[in-house]
Amino acid sequence: MGSNRIRFGEKILFGIFALIAVFAVLSFVMLEVYRSHLNRPMYPVTTSFDFTPEGKRGSELFRERGCTDCHRAVRNGTNNGVSLDGIGSRKTFDQIYGFLKNPEKNYETKTFDHGPTKEAEYVAGLPDSELHAMAVFLSELKAIRGSPDAEAPPPGRSGFIDEMVRLWAPKEWKEDRRDIRQEEGPVQGTTPATAPPPAQNAK
C-alpha cells in the first residue's frame, strides 16, 4: 500500500518553487511602488510626435485594423514584430506608403508577414485612403536624435570619431580596414587642408 506522505526531497523542491513565486510577486510590487513615486517616466522617452488630423485618423486605423497585434507604436501594441516608434525619422512617407501598398516589391525581398498568402496580406488590400492615413501616422513618429530609434548619423567626417580612432584603435585594425569616408571628400565648410586626415593613416 502506497504512502501519501511527501518525501523530504519533494518538500525542498516545493519550497524552492514557493520562494521563487514569492520573490517574483515581491519584486513586481516593489517595482510598481517605485514607479508610482517617480516624477518622470521610468524609461527614457526616445520618440516624439505631433499628429496632423490625418495622422490622428491613421493612428486609430492602425489599432482598428489589427496592426498592434504585431507592432508597437506610441506605447500601443506588442513586440511580436518590428517596433515602429521613430520610423518617421528613418523612412520617408513615400517609403512607408509604398511598403503598405506593395510590401515585398517595395522591400525588395520576402517579408515575414506582409507578403502574399501571409497573415498581414490583408493590409495591402485596405482602401487607399486608409493606407494613406496610416502612412501619414507612421511618418509622423519621430525619434529623438541619438536614440536607438533615430536615423543613421549624417554622412561626412566626424572630428570626434577621428580622434577616438587615432587614440584607441589598434594599429592592426587600422592596417586591415579601409575607411570608407575617404571617398566622401572633406566636410562641408572645410578645405582639404583643414579636413582631418584619414583614420587609417593616423599614428
Image (spheres, helix red, strand yellow):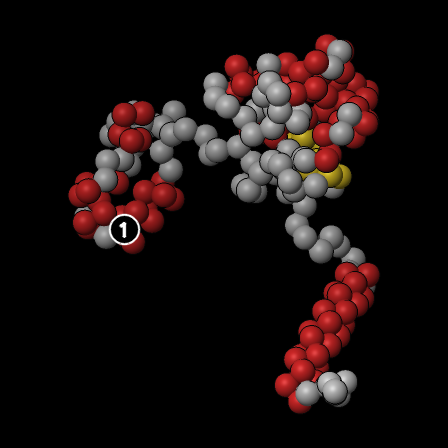
In screen coordinates, is 157 left or right of 147?
Answer: left
- The answer to whether 173 is drawn above or below residue 114 in the figure is below
Asked whether the viewer can see residue 78, the reply is: yes
Q: Which residue is situated farthest in the front direction here?
A: 1
What quarter of the picture does the N terminus occupy?
bottom right
Label 1: few (<14), some or many (≥20) within 10 Å? some
Look at 67% across and 16% down and name the residue there: 124
Which residue matches tag 1?
Answer: 169
Q: Position of residue 158 (x, y in %)?
A: 38, 37
Instruction: Give the image quarter of residue 156.
Output: top left
- The answer to whether 17 is drawn above or below residue 157 in the figure is below
- The answer to whether 101 is drawn above or below residue 138 in the figure is above
In screen coordinates, is 150 left or right of 7?
Answer: left
Instruction: Give the image quarter of residue 28.
Output: bottom right
Q: Judge by depth and name the residue closer to the eye, 3 or 195.
A: 3
Q: Amino acid at mark 1?
A: Ala
